[in-house]
Image: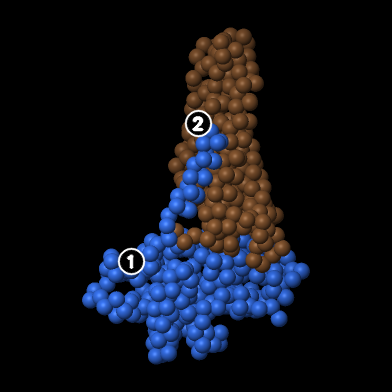
Chain colours: A brown, B blue
Amino acid sequence: MNYHWNWGIFFEQVKNGDETYLDWLITGFGWTIAVSLTAWIIALTLGSVIGTLRTTPRGWVVALGNAWVEFFRNIPLLVQMLLWFFVVPELLPKDLSMWVKQDMPAKEFITASVCLGLFTSARIAEQVRAGIQSLPRGQLYAGMAMGFTLPQTYRYVLLPMAFRIIVPPLTSEFMSVFKNSSVAFAISVLELTFQSRQMQEDSEQGIETYVAVTILYFVCAFIANRVMGQIEQRTRVPGYVTGKH
Amino acid sequence: MKRNALVLVASIAAIGFAQSATAGTLEKVQESGSITMGIRESSKPLSYLDGDQKPIGYHIDICNGIVEAVKVKLKLKTLKVVHQPVTSQNRIPLVTNGTVDIECGSTTNNAARQNQVAFAPTTFVSNVRMAVKKSSGIKGLSQLSGKPVATTTGTTSVQLMRAHEKGQGLDFKEVYGKDHADAFLMLETDRAVAFVMDDNLLAGLIVGSKNPGEYEIVGEVLNVEPIAIMLRKDDPQFQGLVNAAVRDMIKSGEVDKLYKKWFMSPIPPKGENLNFPMSEKLKEALKSPNDNPAEQYNVKK
């Protein structure tokens, strides 16, 4: 292969600016982390609420939760991004629509975080539901017998156990958020994938660029994995499913 | 686990090193009886697919002329032409690794790329300008301060705006479409007030839009980009043949004729006419054919 290798490319200046290619990748890395963490907070909050609602005895609440999950799970993430970015603003009143499209601060960042957050919330809701339903029915009745109301039973009896049980699948989900955030490049978020395309085109050192980006994503997901591993260790209940005997 | 991944990355890189340089392109063509042409699927009118998914365009026609010259040189009765679609991300790797012998698309010849590949004499020159809605009243860079400006991911138009003398000190809010169609959609839906890109591409997008009369191309020329057919580096035999073939076509007036066919007349599939007269820069480049990189077209005064 007649490839001209240049591993020093990261420290060279970009074509029409003062910064180096490494600066581009660092900016991109920063936006990747920002979008991912914001989306994760949205996803964890909404996912927990909706997952919990799906296990309650109220039929219409369960139906609403199911609809939410199926809606966000059955549409590809890229399509959802483009829907939020191009289609949703057109449905707003004209003035508001123009504001969202041109003047709203950090519009790409907000759109991408909300979109990724909602997408992930559907998956977390499914895991929370599974976690709660994996508990023996007796726990619900025990809570009731203690004189707890339904919300209190969830708060003090069911959810603390359910969340411990679903830490492993949540770990995967947390890692996925970082990887899925790469789709945000399609709606103009200047994150890592975006910067890698930019650098590839500007420097023509594609292989070096993608190797660096691969390592950065790997590091991100790996740190996420270790953080969740720590949480799993600290919160385990000795003698129960996830704890050691 | 982490160490394993690093080993994997290192071995992928090593495979790259281990591959020996490909033998001369002409020998390869002689042996295999076929030549692989890299084509673009939507770089109108340079290289794109018609209604039957057949590659057509200005650069495809010029490449067909080159293929004829290869046939004559190698005294072949028949030469099979394989069409390999390429994108702006993979076109250079595919040429360097030997998958594509000659890339007939819309590749800018610049110094960074000349590290990796060689170029035929420049056969098209585009100017980076902006498309706006006529109703916006925008005529130049200075009116874009504080407004959202669209361009396509992987291009550096916004940096060009900042580098331009009239753009210095202004604050541009850039938005990036993932491809030209998305970036144009941003202009169409008022997400951006201008779309900065090569003028020939803008003309093509406008002609193909729902209301072509709504848009116009305005403003300062931000960059001049020589666009050329791309081939492998360090293959003097093949490069010499390609150069001679392209120069002959320029001298004989064939290139002029092809320009009129693709830029000044109705073209497939919908029969629209770009009405895009030859720029002064292109006339100059055709008068004395050369493979100068973009940097020599944009010397700062």
Label at residue B154? none
Q: Could one spot residue A95 in this view of the protein?
A: no
> Is the residue marked by circle 1 packed among few (<14), some (14-19), or many (20+) residues within 10 Å?
some
**SS of the residue under disc 2:** helix
Q: Are marks 1 and 2 on the same chain?
A: no
Relative placement, left or right, of B247 versus A20 is left
Q: Is residue A227 above or below residue B135?
A: above
Residue A126, numbered label: 2
Mark 2: give few (<14), some (14-19) or many (20+) Cα within 10 Å.
many
Q: Please name the residue shown 70% across and 60% down the image.
A: A19
User: Marks 1 and 2, how far apart in space?
Assistant: 57 Å
Report x, y in % for residue B164.
69, 74
Quadrant assignment, res B199: bottom right
Is B206 or A1 nearer to us in this picture?
A1
Q: Pointer 1 indicates a residue of which chain? A: B
Within the image, what quadrant is residue B100 found in?
bottom left
The disc numbered 2 marks a residue on which chain? Answer: A
- Amino acid type at circle 1 is Lys
Q: Nearer the viewer, mark 1 or mark 2?
A: 1
Q: Name the residue rendered at 60%, 12% in the picture.
A: A238
* Amino acid at the residue labelled 2: Glu
Q: Is residue A105 left or right of residue A164?
A: right
- Identified at 45% across, 52% down, the residue is B18
- The picture places residue B162, in percent across and down from the top left corner, at 70, 69
Q: Residue furthest right?
A: B169
The answer to whether A27 is drawn above or below residue A129 in the figure is below
Element at label 1: helix
Question: From what the image shows, is residue A39 above or below residue A210?
Answer: above
Image coordinates of residue B172 in percent, x first then y, are 69, 65
Q: Is residue B100 visible?
A: yes
Residue ID for mark 1: B28
Q: How many marks?
A: 2
